Amino acid sequence: MTAHSSSLSITTTSTAFHLHYSRSTLQLETHLHDDDDDDMGHCNSVMAAYLDDFFTTQFHMVNELKKKTIKKERRLRRRCQKS
């Protein structure tokens, strides 16, 4: 089986987000640029948490859909073989 993986980078003036994902793993790295503004640092932390939650949820939903599709495909093959 071939391992498929990808990455996505989002960079703003104050933060860099790097999302790495493959068939079985998801990793979000957040790099906050040095900033004296505490409010901006808090906003970046909130954004990082939001992105982590969003991508993790999407990742699990896609994996569940893949599992269901594979099960349906197997069931259909068995039915066709019995016929």
Image (cartoon, rainbow, N blue to C red):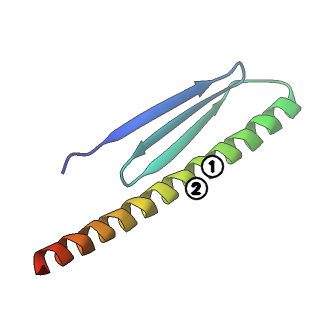
- Name the quadrant containing residue 63: bottom left
- Name the quadrant containing residue 77: bottom left
Which kind of residue does numbered mark 2 sit on?
A: Thr
Q: Looking at the image, which is closer to me, 68 or 42?
A: 68
Q: Position of residue 57 (x, y in %)?
A: 58, 55
Residue 56 placement (x, y as % from top left) = 56, 53
Q: Which mark, by number, is residue 57?
A: 2
For label 2, the SS is helix
- Going by the numbered disc 1, the residue's amino acid type is Phe
Placement of 56 over or under 12, stated as above or below: below
Please give the name of the residue rendered at 50% of the width and 52% of the height, measured from the top-left corner.
59
**Front-lying residue, 38 or 83:** 83
Marks 2 and 1: in contact by CB < 8 Å?
Answer: yes
| The label number, if any, that marks residue 2 in the structure image | none
Residue at 43% across, 61% down: 65
Q: Nearer the viewer, residue 68 or 41?
A: 68
Left/right of residue 4 with respect to residue 38 in the rendered view: left
* Left or right of residue 82, residue 4 in this image: right
User: Dot 1 corresponds to which residue?
Assistant: 54
Is residue 74 found left or right of 54 in the rendered image?
left
The residue that appears at 38% across and 59% down in the rendered structure is 66
Secondary element at tag 1? helix
Residue drawn at (35%, 40%) of the image: 5
